[in-house]
Amino acid sequence: MKLKFTALAAAAVVSAAAPAMADLVFPSLSYRTGPYAAGGIPFADGYADYFTLLNERDGGIGGEMAKVIECETGYNTEKGVECYESTKGEGSLIYQPLSTGITYQLIPKVTADGIALHTMGYGRTSAKNGKVFSNVFNYPANYWDGASVAINHLLDLNDGDINGKKVALVYHNSAYGKEPIRTLEELSAKHGFELTTLAVDHPGQEQKSQWLQIRREKPDYVLMWGWGVMNQVAIQEAANIRFPMENFIGVWWSGGEHDVIPAGDGANGYKAVTFHNVGSDFPVFDDVQKYVVDAGKAAGNGDQIGTAVYNRGFYAAMLAAEAARNAQEIAGKSDITAADMLKGMESLEITEERMAELGMPNFGPSFTVTCENHGGPGLGAIQQWDAAAQEWSLISDFAPSDTEIIDALVMEDSMAFAKENNIEERCN
Amino acid sequence: MPEQLLWAAEAMMNGLMAGVLYALVALGFVLIFKASGVFNYAQGVMALFAALTLVGIMDGQVPFAHLINAVFGTEIHHFGWHVPAILAIFLTGVVMVGLAIFIERFVLRHLVNQPDIILFMATIGLAYFMEGVGDLMWGSEIKTLDVGLPQGISETIDEATYNWFGYGFFIDRLDIVATIIAALLVASLTIFSQYSKQGRALRAVADDHQAALSVGISLRFIWVLVWSIAGFVALVAGMMWGAKSGVQFSLSLIALKALPVLMLGGFTSIPGAIVGGLIIGVGEKLFEFSIGPLVGGATENWFAYVLALVFLVFRPQGLFGEKIIERV
Amino acid sequence: MLYREAGDFKTTYVEDGQTFPIKFDRIAYYILLAVAFGVVPFIINDYWANAVLVPFLIYAVAAIGLNILVGYAGQVSLGTGGFMAVGAYACYKLMTSFPEVSILIHVVLAGVITAAVGVLFGLPSLRIKGFYLAVATLAAQFFLVWLFNKVPWFYNYSASGQISAPERTVFGIEVTGANTDAWAKYLVCLIFVTACAWLARNLTRGTTGRTWMAIRDMDIAAEIIGVNPLKAKLTAFAVSSFFVGIAGALFFAVYLGSVEVGEVFGINKSFLVLFMIIIGGLGSIFGSFAGAAFMVLMPVLLKNILVGGLGWPTDIAAHFELVIVGGLIVVFLILEPHGLAQLWRVAKEKLRLWPFPH
């Protein structure tokens, strides 16, 4: 962001005058304003920084420069549509809208236009079924995996028996927040815990009623599906009623630094589910410092590096870049199209070795994507907040979710979608 | 069942406290509406702007840093000092006065004698404008506001009620502080408007613009004054809500919580704002407690309006509003 | 020189009472319609349809609806978002329950259902007046959104609570769903806009419209001269909600295709449509179009200039967008408090005299 406007304007003029260069285009539908800016900024920064790193250090992906077109959506569906329409003609390879609303919007559109949509840890969960959703990917984990991983963590804490325990779910009263309920109900039937659900309406600044209820009913554990200001208030209220923080587990969208810092020491011990590693203690971040930050090319203020959501954006960019690389290999050319990119994503394989090569050992789980399975294995881990050190740390390995239950649910929901929209199954 | 009763009492107590916080926001609306007949949509954004400025000053942030960096290629973020809370609150107050002068000079002065809806619209423009400027000045990430307000359960009340009833009530210490501050604020506003010269002028303007003008009261000064006071009230509201959630965009949405309060209490009455706040706070908490679980919860947002609606059907001018006299 | 009425003599009342009494206006109007129907569909692309024209047309319908209530009948409403949601959900339920019936009929029926809901929430208007009335419509706004979010029947028990429009065709051409061509979307919306504007214009200059305006100007006086306030207010709510419901149905089925109620039809939508009619001009059909154009096109235009043209970082551009839109609203109000429609009227007056102003 240290480039001068004049330079940027000049660059814009030059690029407009010159014939379209064969860049690999990765549009970034970000939101740096509006009620969810706190989550949108670090993600967009991480996403942009990874591609800047590739361009500066390696000269792009397979010799092709990566170009990130940022477009501000403000988490607003209509603006998201505008962004999609304005960028799809630029040769965009993959969309990552970072909003459940925009995702639902884009699912039919990308399918019609033949572009890939990667909704990492959000969006439509049943898109995991590649037989129905040809262009939508949600590896490595989805909400239902998240719910299951959280419950698995509770099982671990209780030596595998949570029969009769009380679990409360505090959720954002929207499509996003309602996602885990079905899975949790199934899991509650399986493991015999008692589930209560507490809805919090947007924006969620006033949650006294919900937390008084929690205080009265004394659930053993509280899970949270929150977003925006709801997260900060919930964590503060939990601290206020002295709810034991180590029994309070949020989904990954409730697990950023900005969610816990406002509550200060009260947030110590709060846990969140995650599907990627935390902190900046990876070799790749030395390169980020050297090629991106020191070169004055960091996105945004450059002060988000290593935060949980920044890492998520960084990880998303890494997966996109790896898919592009894979697509280049398959297509046998460096200048890939959106159709090639789809093939690249559909046969993506992320291994321990590859991540170590990239300077990101154990940054995320290793997984394979296939035509049938667009969601990966659904591995997740638990991170815990240390208020004194002001950092997250992983307290478990990436462990699988309860695929038995989730696969059945995915199948049911995706089949309903297929029937509603007359989609024939692929991959046969 | 006594246990249910105790819980209901606890919900009611918390409702009262929440009501005070709503009333704080509504107060700003009422002040401006009384003095200038403007329904100030920007009140919520003013709270956000005030809180942003407060945090920015406390942390020694450079205003417009992001913009400056982008234009000049510099890399500045902070001055590197920390301003003590009291001084920062004072400085923010000065900024809010500056904002009031700005608004009077560039907006209100040009819209004298326009219909209500136009003035309302102008405050909407103002809200957009201030939201943009606030973001440009201080950035849109969440900031932690720490002016030393206490938070968390009040143990005294918890223990006392436990000893009396066998069930410890939960009262947030922040809410207690908010109640005290709100009481002080209302008391000082009352004293100011009853006994000071400017206060009398203020009431005169509220009663009748033209009559006030004809006895030599400067309307412009009164407007600056009242917008400054509203700015200060917004600052207090922003501090209270910001302490809970961090300072961020959503702070501007607290205006939505104040709307039913205003309508219930009447646009022109300060006691109305307080009583309205309490009624809404208690009503929505009790409803959520009793009926909420039956219908799936999250009822507070709409119930506040339905409650206000029920009151208005019986008293169309709000509880304390001036009686509407209609002549042909 | 060009724009004048000299020599344009009216010999019948019908001629004198027509919508565009000046010949030049009339011709311009027909040319506009011809271009909108005959030229634009052939040159429109996805970007122009989805990002600019379709939202503009749909917002214009909603703005006409709200303008009838606020501008003509003087009843303040902040429930537009909620009523649009009623239209959208009614359309969805109808589309999925009766797939064989044409989507166009569903959209109109959705408007009718919304009109019924609007009348219900309009009842308090008989007792509550002025800004206080906003509370009734705000109650509708929050309650309806909550209801659609809470009751699974409305979203056919889908897992996520989102509703998605299935593919529907008109004369064998797809108008909803992902594979709809840009021109088809545009034309469907255009037909509804034209019909609504025509209907609204003729309602507002007839008896109904006159009773509305009488109520707006002073309801007690209107009552004395024999206007039935119950009928006038409730018809205003019904007609207004009918248009808003159609806008909601189109918004969901044609424009977005899938909708989450809290996000798309939240309170912000209510404010947005209200801004449109105030900026455009209260009590003016043209104003509804002008306001919708301003609020839809301005941000897109600014974004394209600031980000696309000048290459600013998106966040700074977004913040500047707010500053500029806010500043423009204030400037417009100071220059012309009665909205863009009044600006247009003044411009026309000037044109009539030009080049000999005296």
Image: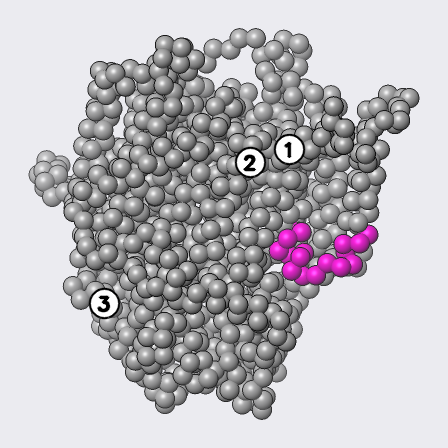
Please state the horizontal and vertical placement of residue B129, each as a whole percent of the image. 44, 43
Q: Is residue A202 left or right of residue A426?
A: left
Q: Name the residue under label 3.
A: A391
The reply to whether the C-beta atoms of the residues labelled 3 and 2 are less than 8 Å apart is no
Q: Residues within 10 Å of mark 3 (few under 14, many from 20)?
A: many
Q: Are marks 3 and 2 on the same chain?
A: no
Asked whether C51 falls inside the magenta stretch, the response is yes
Q: How is the image coloured?
A: one colour
Q: Which element type, helix, strand or loop, lies under badge 2?
A: helix
Mark 1 lies on residue: C343
Select label 3 or label 2 by which is in front: 2
Disc 1 crowd rating (10 Å Cα; few below 14, some 14-19, many 20+) is some
How far apart are labels 3 and 2 at the CA level? 50 Å
Query: Which corner quadrant holds the N terminus of chain B?
Result: top left
Q: Residue at x 32, y 51 (%)?
A: B63
SS for callout 1: helix
Examine the image and state in which quarter residue B238 appears.
top left
Which residue in the protein does label 2 denote?
C332
Q: Distance between the residues labelled 2 and 1?
A: 9 Å
